[in-house]
Amino acid sequence: MRYAHGLVIGKFYPPHAGHRHLIDTAAAACDHVTVVVAASSVESVPLPLRTAWLREAHPQPHVEIVPVVDDTEIDYGSDEIWSAHVAAFRSGVATRSGLGVSVPPVDAVFSSEEYGPELAKRLSAEHVPVDPARGRFPVSGTAVRDDPVAHWEFLAPPVRAYLARRVVVVGAESTGTTTLARALAAHYASRGGVWAATRWVPEYGRTFTEEKLAAARRAARDPSLWLDDLTWEPADFVHIAEHHAIMEDAAARSGSPLLVCDTDAFATALWHERYLGGPAPAVEAVHERNPHHLWILTAPDGVPFEQDGWRDGASIRSWMSARFEEELEQRSLPHIKVKGPHDQRLAAALTATEALLTNPWPFTTPLTS
């Protein structure tokens, strides 16, 4: 049967494959679909973020995703509370009408929930049940919040990127950051299952430096130019931080519940200090927008300095290591310092990462009946 205007209601806290199936089913059966994202103020995933995730997953022109704040308690036995919820839902349905766009009345409510028939009745619409037994997609928002790892396969790329625990390996030059980042990611990938997709994000700053040097040589037509001949600008460090953040998000969207990063914007701000002698507010802004969960500082102890032609020197290495430790402490960023041979460093990194992964994901409890 074809419907003029279908309605889907949900918290989408967070969205999962069952939600996508529900909305796609409505989209296939209706000329227009309104999806009301009904969030309460006590929930920890921002409403605009959930709305953006659903809009990315459902770009169909006849599907409209509408955010609504609904702080009314849940009590399916109360007519007064039912009326308050329905009023909130109607406010979302009326959004396009308020913009002067004609929208036909809701004639179908698509739902997998027990409240679906009553909601449809109160809207004078037909109820269309969609996999209420969750046989096709055995997942729910509650199940995801309780154990995201167990339900990772049901999460869309942007939700994975939001939930992935991000571990950053930082340190001065020639302290084994790349070696440790690779090894940490490889350890988890070797577990298989959902962990097989564990990725590590390489340091973009080194790549940028190589490209900057090559460009300078071409511009000057002088292949003998070297690092000391380069002129650094604040914009260079902003670009490095922003590009690295883009690389991180791309990896997290297709990865496992863990993402390992070789440096980040926090580290880039300290390299800005090293080369330009001052703070980097624009780089710090990138750091604030891209939260991480654990920093692993690689100390020089136990790693001989290797000059590959691109590094400052052993004395600078010690100074930078001290700055990293000082800033991590001052900012109260969760971190550990690893030193000694590689096996010892990896063991310490694994212990700290396991502790991070066993902590519950920080979902607040939604309003319940």
Image: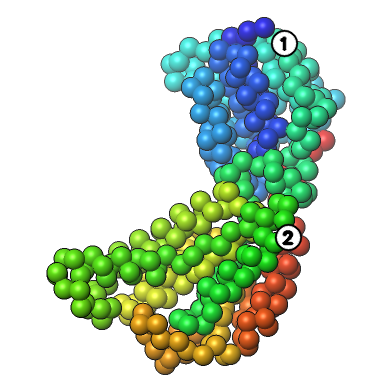
The amino acid sitting under disc 1 is Glu
Of residues 306 and 79, the one drawn nearer to the viewer in this rendering: 306
Query: Quick check: can you spot residue 90?
Result: no
Which numbered circle lies on residue 126? 1
Badge 1, how many Cα within 10 Å: few under 14, some, many 20+? some
Asked which colour scheme the image uses, the reply is rainbow
Q: Earlier in the sequence, mark 1 or mark 2?
A: 1
The amino acid sitting under disc 2 is Arg
Which label sits in the foreground, 1 or 2?
Answer: 2
Q: Give coordinates of residue 55: x percent, y percent.
A: 53, 33
Quarter of the N terminus within the rendering: top right
Of residues 111 and 195, the one drawn nearer to the viewer in this rendering: 195
Image point 74% across, 22% down: which residue? 130
Q: Give coordinates of residue 123: x percent, y percent.
A: 69, 14
In the rendered image, the vertical position of residue 259 relative to residue 91, given as above or below = below
* Secondary structure beneath label 2: loop
Which numbered circle lies on residue 41? none
In this view, the residue farthest toward the bottom is 315
* Secondary structure beneath label 1: strand
Instruction: Please tell me in which quadrant of the rendered image residue 306 appears.
Output: bottom left
In the rendered image, the vertical position of residue 241 relative to residue 145, given as above or below = below
Quarter of the C terminus within the rendering: top right
Q: Which residue is labeled 2 in the image?
A: 191
In the displayed structure image, the side of residue 279 where residue 251 appears, left or right: right
Image point 55% across, 29% down: which residue? 58
Q: Give me the C-alpha separation between circle 1 and circle 2.
A: 48 Å
In the displayed structure image, the side of residue 363 where residue 332 appears, left or right: left
Query: Quick check: can you spot residue 202?
Result: yes
Q: Give coordinates of residue 75: x percent, y percent.
A: 81, 30
Of residues 25 and 201, the one drawn nearer to the viewer in this rendering: 201
